[in-house]
Amino acid sequence: MISKRLSELRKKKKWSLQYIADQLDIAKSTYAGYESGYRQPSLEAVRELAQLFGTSTDYLLGAVDDPEKRESKVIELTEADLSNLHLTIDGKLLTQEDINQMIAFIRVKRGMEAG
Amino acid sequence: MISKRLSELRKKKKWSLQYIADQLDIAKSTYAGYESGYRQPSLEAVRELAQLFGTSTDYLLGAVDDPEKRESKVIELTEADLSNLHLTIDGKLLTQEDINQMIAFIRVKRGMEAG
DNA sequence: TTAAGTTGTTCGCGTTCTGCGAACCTACGC
DNA sequence: GCGTAGGTTCGCAGAACGCGAACAACTTAA
């Protein structure tokens, strides 16, 4: 189940095995084992893979069949609670410091425009 | 993470180790290992445990902090479609240009850290 | 046309971890 | 006392992990 869904998601994103292995800091052959079904990822790896693919562990594990359902939503970044909200760029999670700096960046930019 | 959450959920439901072990058809000592953190359940066991406790695997694995929440919100900014996702800072909507600049900002920052 | 790199696959190997039953200690009720 | 149920921990055999290496197929660079 998880092997099939990992393979589908990766191909849809056009990512290589090596890219994902680098993101999780594991060997290419290790991740290849996940997709082939030869191995099972650790629970931590499952969580990280769900995050990387932008889906849920429930989907990866086959507990649900919907990859994701993204509703229209307004997200205020200065109040963002990172426990349940994960912003990524290039598939890599943004830290709270990243977000704080982005907020500062936008505020400066706006201040300059308002001049 | 999962050990803590399993323990909390089981106590809240006032279930015994043996009861859960019977439900999953595993040994009592096996499930006890899950709660003590001495062992990690298989992916299949995680799925069954989530179902038994009426929660999500995302919660058991610590991808979300709300037991009721079915899915972790992961938003990839480079793919952000503003038609159904609205980011704000200080209550003011971010433009696509704002987001593009934030992405560039983070990429530069990461490049410097990696460099 | 070579040479060099990338991608995906599959080995073997050493290590780690799983799952089990058994044993143990409480606490409770008879 | 006795028996039962709940919870913890142990040793063991077997399974599974993660890794690097090697390989063929393909693309890119020189």
Image (tube, coloured by chain):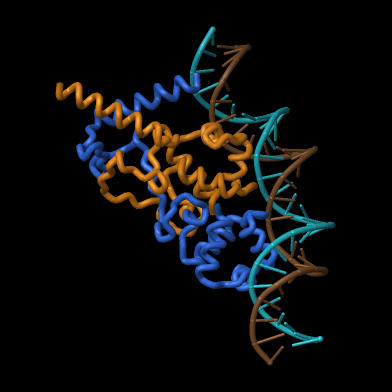
Chain colours: A orange, B blue, C brown, D cyan
Q: Residue B59: where, in percent of width, then height?
A: 47, 56
- Can you tell which quarter of the image residue C21 is in? bottom right
The residue at 26%/48% (across/down) is A72
Residue D2 relative to residue A60: left or right = right
The residue at 25%/37% (across/down) is B89
- Can you tell which quarter of the image residue B82 is in? top left
- Please tell me which residue lies in front, B90 or B98: B90
The residue at 23%/37% (across/down) is B90
- Can you tell which quarter of the image residue A25 is in? top right
Residue B88 relative to residue B78: left or right = left
Q: Residue A21: where, in percent of width, then height?
A: 56, 35
Residue A29 relative to residue B9: left or right = right
The residue at 50%/68% (across/down) is B12
Q: Residue B9: where, in percent of width, then height?
A: 51, 64
Q: Residue furthest left?
A: A114
Q: Quadrant of the C terminus of chain A?
A: top left
- Please tell me which residue lies in front, A100 or B84: A100
- Please tell me which residue lies in front, A38 or B92: B92
Q: Residue C3: where, in percent of width, then height?
A: 62, 12
Q: Quadrant of the N terminus of chain A?
A: bottom right
Vertical side of D2 occupied by B56: above or below:
above
